[in-house]
Amino acid sequence: MWVATEELRNERIGDYAIIGDTRSAALVSRNGSIDWLCWPRFNSRSIFARILDAEKGGCFSIRPRSGRAQRRYIENTNVLETVWETETGRVRVLDLMLALDEDEKRRRLLPYRQLLRRVEGLEGSVDIEVVYQPRPDYARIRPVLELRRGDTIWCADGPEVWHMRSDAEMHVDPEGGTARAAFALRRGEKKYFALSYETHAPAVFGAIGDPADDEIERTIAWWRAWCGQFQYEGPYADEVLRSALALKLLVYAPSGGVVAAPTTSLPEKIGGIRNWDYRYCWLRDASFTVGVLYDCGFHVEGSAFADWLLYATRLTQPSLQILYDVFGEYQLPEKEIERLAGYCGSRPVRVGNQAHGQFQLDVYGEVLGAVEEYTNHGEHLYRDTRKMICKLADIVVRRWREPDSGIWEKRSGRVQHVHAKVMAWSALDCAERLAEKGHLPVDASLWASTKDEIKKVVLADGFNTKLNSFVSILGGDELDASLLYIARVGFLEGDDPRLLGTIDAIRSHLGQDDLLYRYPQDTDDGLPPGEGAFLPCSFWLVEALAIAKRFDEAHDLYQKLLARRNDVGLLSEECDVASGALIGNFPQALTHIGLMNAAMRLHQPVARRGVEANATAPQPVEKKEKQPGK
């Protein structure tokens, strides 16, 4: 009888890798288990959710009975390779989702969604164990599994059908909703496992055997062709490309939207309640996302995200939400999934996000900044888009004095956030330049005068002379890492003494070496206290130091942050300061966007939006040795 060799427990968040097809994504543990997968889209119901409940969540595991694993992404791809070394031999497992252009997909009959796993003997003979345990709809369903055609395990939930096809002999426990296999794999032998999904359509079975090898080669070629667009030639090219590849997996290709993360409810503190659903598209950092995609040579993705942004925001104009789904849907009610125990007991598990109803003034600056990046790269604004942009700028003129919920989506009520005022200034700054360049045929004098008024208020009431720093709230005395945006958007010159004082104060009061908290841990944000350091903030600090021409500090900080990536180059939203463990939803788009933008600033610092850099920054004499597999 087959006996499980793994105890039922949660893997560390940082021990996961990601595979995907730019429509959905799966997390693969270091132990060869797919513990998270939602089909057909990022925010669809899960089929495997072991990461949120080690006992009930469901998984798809392929691994030897014992041994050590070393893994990497095949160069310039998102195809994951794991090599297991045991006492009796070595095997290699490839994990991927098929990544093909739409034209090629239309020419060939393929499953609607497909995940492919291939295990290959390299040396000796290795005993392999396979567990296929689908638990659809966040483990609410324990499906009936049926073996069909001799090589395919079928299960369904209404119109949704999953087929797992393999040339390994699978044994089905129909009542337990689990299928298993156990076999010895010798050098040169291969076994294939193709999981496919269909809904409201005839089923198409995944390829195994030689046709599967062809699919793998096509997918590798597709990723390498995509990487061929990469243009950044700075000292951190390998790291930036790996982050770009991770970011590409978070793009929903049919619409161009970029989800914040492929996961929900991975905690900001183990055992805490700060567990949010990040499988949506945030406007936060939109301009820097568009900009860095363009800067790296990925013009299709940059334009597509800007197009999605303009479409989604048009649906809710004249107001803007802070998040939408990949299609621009803005009604995203937050619910709790009682069935799941949560990652390491961190409850509740949530789907949806009630932050969608908050008023955040800063998103206007992000949207208008993204539009400016869009036009800077030759894109045209149509008449209805021009009208909408003018309306957005006019809303800033009318509402900039109002309190808001702030960038961190606090649940303690609205206040006068300094970061929000800076971003309101940035929105009008971008709108004014768009008008100057002829993209908006309007008189921008009201925007310009309002921008000046905002700046006066921020400089008078947002700077605390005792702290020698800008502060979180007008007239307050609390620091906030979002104030680093003052350098990022060019509100002040990078070497302005007030900005330098803010950088030093944030590092002193919110910093732990290379890590930064978002705000003081005793801040009342409407939730029980306790969270990790917020990794994007550290990359914003790198940018601020580079813009301030403190290059040695910036490079030193950046290299420390790179060392915090996991073995395949991925980062989460937060980091536990005491243990160094990655926590929060994973991998996190905002963190990888921060990594990419920081590298750009280190290579060619800019003092403000809309102004081209005129010099290349000094580069480090040598980089720290990279970790294996990166």
Image (cartoon, rainbow, N blue to C red):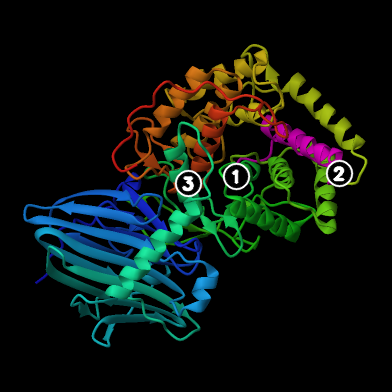
Residue 260 or residue 120, whichever sits in front: 120
Span of residues in magenta: 411-439
Quarter of the image with the C terminus is top left
Reading the image, the residue beneath label 3 is 588
Marks 3,1: beta carbons within 8 A: no
Q: CA distance from mark 1 to mark 2?
A: 24 Å
Looking at the picture, how far across and down is residue 577, in whole percent?
Answer: 38, 31
Of 417 and 178, which appears nearest the observer? 178
Q: Is residue 51 left or right of residue 113?
A: left
Helix, strand or loop for disc 3: loop
> Could one spot residue 134 in this view of the protein?
no
The residue singled out by tag 1 in the image is 289
In front here: 161 or 224?
224
Tell me the kind of residue under disc 2: Gly
- The three-letter code of the residue at mark 1 reads Thr
Q: Earlier in the sequence, mark 3 or mark 2?
A: 2
Q: Give the vertical position of 533 relative to 271 (above or below).
A: above
Q: Which mark is residue 438?
A: 2
- Name the residue nearer the viewer: 420 or 625: 625
User: Which label lies toward us, 3 or 2?
Assistant: 2
How far is disc 3 from disc 1 in space, using C-alphas? Answer: 13 Å
Q: Tell me the distance, in whole angstroms, between the alpha carbons under discs 3 and 2.
A: 37 Å
Picture layout, residue 46 above or below residue 235: below
Q: Secondary structure at mark 2?
A: loop
Q: Quadrant of the N terminus?
A: bottom left
Residues under numbered marks 3 and 2 in contact, where contact means CB atoms less than 8 Å apart:
no
Q: Is residue 506 visible?
A: yes
